[in-house]
Amino acid sequence: MRNVLDRIKAALLRRAEDSARRSARSFGRRSALARLGGLLVGGAAAAALPFDRAWGATPAKGDYDDKSCDYWRYCAVDGFLCSTAGGSSSQCPVGSEASLISWVGTCHNPGDNRDYLISYYDCCGKTPFSGAQYCFGSKGERPAYSLGLSNDVNWCMANENQGYHCTVALVVGVAGA
């Protein structure tokens, strides 16, 4: 009986020691510095990513109606607006997915009098789109042989489900910045 208790005691001590060593590796000075360095590098990389710099700003009066073809982000859109098809101007509706490829336009925001790069993504896989607003904005459109600038292409062609549902307009950054 004593032999069994000694083995249990030894196993528990080994486990405790292993746990303490694992904890020391995870929470020691070196690992804390490594985590801090990772946060700094990750923060610097995140700051370099494109994002909507107008986020959180109060739009000018009449500037923000993402359900209307007159909304400034839609200057080069060709398709149904996701904002009227169950999604938003920047998010696909539930049940659909963003196309793997997109086209780009440059639109003028009258709210701050600046030009922005807009990336248009088709949302694929969900049909039908009854009741959605159709818009055709051909500002800056190029012929179909310049695919990245043409809005007349089924951009869902690269997705597994190639059915077109609607289009979103993401602000990528300030033009010329």
Image (spheres, helix red, strand yellow):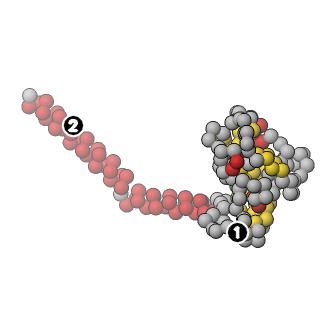
- Which callout, 2 or 1, points at the residue further toward the start of the chain? 2
C-alpha separation, residue under disc 2 versus residue under disc 1: 71 Å
Q: Which residue is mark 2?
A: 11
The quadrant the C terminus occupies is bottom right
Q: Amino acid at mark 2?
A: Ala
The quadrant the N terminus occupies is top left
Counting from the top left corner in percent of width and height, residue 117 is at 76, 60
Q: Quadrant of residue 49?
A: bottom right
- The residue at the point 73 percent across, 69 percent down is 111
Counting from the top left corner in percent of width and height, residue 19 is at 29, 46
Res 12 seen here: yes
Q: Quadrant of residue 16?
A: top left
Q: Nearest the camera: 45 or 74?
A: 74
Q: Which residue is mark 1?
A: 61
Give the structural element (helix, strand or loop) at label 1.
loop
Give the structural element (helix, strand or loop) at label 2.
helix
Counting from the top left corner in percent of width and height, residue 10 is at 18, 38
Res 167 seen here: no
Left or right: residue 83 versus residue 137 is left
For this orientation, the residue located farthest to the bottom is 113
- The residue at the point 79 percent across, 65 percent down is 108
Q: Nearest the camera: 119 or 34?
A: 119
For this orientation, the residue located farthest to the top is 1
- The residue at the point 32 percent across, 51 percent down is 23
Q: Count how many numbered circles sit on residues in the image.
A: 2
Counting from the top left corner in percent of width and height, residue 85 is at 69, 44
